[in-house]
Amino acid sequence: MRKEIEEIDLNEPSHEKNEQVCVIQHPAILIIGEAGAGKSTFGNWLLGYHGDNGPFEIGGSNDHVTNICKSRLIKIIKIKNRTYNLIDTPGLFDPNEDVKSDESLNKIADAINHCSYGIQAIVLVIKKDRPFDSQTIKKIKSFLGEPALNHMIVALTYCNLKQTGNKEKLLESLSPKLKSFLDSIGYRYIISPNPDLFPKGHKIVNNNMENAKEFINNFPEAYTTETFNKVRQAREECEKIALLEQENKISQEEIKKLKEQIDEIGRRIAKEEAAKKCFKLDTKVILEGGNLVPMSGITVNDKICVDVINGKLKFSEVYLIAHCDYEDETEFLKVEYISP
């Protein structure tokens, strides 16, 4: 089996110059999941190696090797006389590492576009005790498209000895959200045994890997790069629309603020104009008959002096009197009169 395994580094400069070397020559099996979930361990088990000692490099809990290493490793595996490329990918969907997740998605997108024969299966590796986040599935659907779920297998990792040996006990320990997701993909799941608990060739290891191979081989047709690119184009269009909507939202908010500023200026001007026609109650005014009376003594229809033009008094008829101080109605009056 080891003679059938071939390593390809898509990031080596020499391969970048030779596109034919980069092109994956068989339907692909894509291993995806969060950093540290056990993707490389599963890949080694599937290839017939011990989970901790195979061609896919294993990192410690704080050393996510695939995410850091310079190359993305691709192996060749044969399942019942059918040949596939097995692709181990960088860690995905770490909410604390948005930039690295984006970089990982770009690398996976690049790998998928090299899969000219399509993707036979997508193995989603999930750490059993990690809270299952439905957002992860939404991101996978957004990135790969809804049809990708028809090619998906779940590999559960970090199960204890009893759970690994008894699927019923394992299912009892899973969260409702994870059970619901397994149900949505037809319960296509296997256990990737803990390499600290099982040796190479153990019956439980072999049974789970055989189940995985059976799932992989039973998919009728590969998920194509054409489908992926259609999904990617649709996603990019949605992102553009969202960006435009966000920019438009910002513009609308700026317009709203500007309108509020204009309204405030208008209110201030109106207030200032109104203040010009406000008088204290003891203000003296001249009536048309020449009498000098306090403002509190005038009534509607009285004619009062409102201006002096060329030495002549101009009188106007009062048609409105209103109190302008709402706290003390006796202090100010607003007087409206007919313009002379």
Image (cartoon, helix red, strand yellow):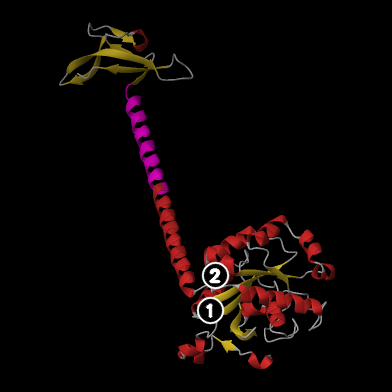
When asked about the image quadrant of residue 122, the answer is: bottom right
Quadrant where the C terminus is found in the figure: top left
The residue carrying mark 2 is 102
Q: Amino acid at mark 1?
A: Ala
State the count of labels. Answer: 2
Residues under labels 2 and 1: Cα distance? 14 Å
Residue 251 percent across, percent down from the top left:
39, 51
Q: Is residue 86 left or right of residue 338?
A: right
Q: Is residue 16 above or below residue 154?
A: below
Residue nearest the viewer, comparing 110 with 224: 224
Residue that sits furthest to the right in the current view: 162
Residue contact between numbered discs 2 and 1, judged by CB atoms under 8 Å: no
Residue corresponding to mark 1:
111
Residue 74 image offset from top left, x and y in percent: 60, 84
Asked whether, in this view, residue 168 is left or right of residue 66, the answer is right
The residue sitting at the bottom extreme is: 3
* Crowd rating for badge 2 (residues with CA inside 10 Å; few <14, some 14–19, many 20+): some
